[in-house]
Image (tube, helix red, strand yellow):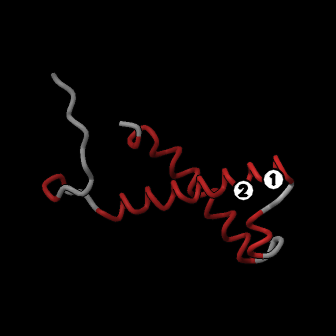
Amino acid sequence: MLAKPYRHFDSPEEGGDRKVKWLDRIAMILVIVGALNWGLVGLANIDLVALICGAMSILSRIVYILVGLSAIWVAVKSPALLK
């Protein structure tokens, strides 16, 4: 039996949902933002999120939580995203 070709989630005949694709994109952007922030912390001891939102303010904590949840989302979805 041959493997199925890559399934495109926007395809109505596949029952796909555009929300999934948007969620994947938003999660990937947040993971990149988090990675860049950690890179700046390691290289120059600059926490960009804390500079923009305030050190451990409610807004910065929300950003950190969203980045963490996005990392989990991308890790769980990565096998499907890499196909």
Residue 43 shown left or right of residue 13 in the figure: right
Asked whether 52 or 5 is in front, the reply is 52
Taking the view exactly as shown, the residue that stands out farthest to the front is 44
- Quadrant housing residue 3: top left
Residue 17 x, y percent position in the rendering? 28, 61
Measured Cα–Cα span from mark 2 to mark 1: 6 Å
**Quadrant the N terminus occupies:** top left
Secondary structure beneath dot 2 equals helix
Q: Please tell me how crowded label 2 is: few (under 14), some (14-19), or many (20+) other residues with Cα within 10 Å.
A: some
Q: Position of residue 11 (x, y in %)?
A: 19, 55
Q: Amino acid at mark 2?
A: Asn
Direction left: furthest residue: 13
Residue occupying image coordinates x 43% and y 37%: 79
Residue at image coords 74%, 77%: 58
Element on which disc 1 rests? helix
Please give the residue where the numbered disc 2 appears in the rendered image. 37
Q: Residue 16 bears which disc, if any?
A: none
How far across and how far down the image is residue 31, in percent? 59, 54
Horizontally, is 28 left or right of 6 in the view?
right
Up/down of 46 relative to 55, above or below: above
Viewer-side residue, 76 vs 40: 40
Contact check, label 2 and label 1, Cβ < 8 Å: yes
Q: Look at mark 1 in the image and give the residue it sits on.
A: 41
Q: Residue at x 46, y 41 (%)?
A: 78
The total number of labels drawn is 2
Looking at the picture, which amino acid does disc 1 mark?
Val
Image coords of residue 67 (percent x, y)? 62, 59
Q: Quadrant of the C terminus?
A: top left
Residue furthest top in the image: 1
Left or right, 14 with respect to 29, comes to left
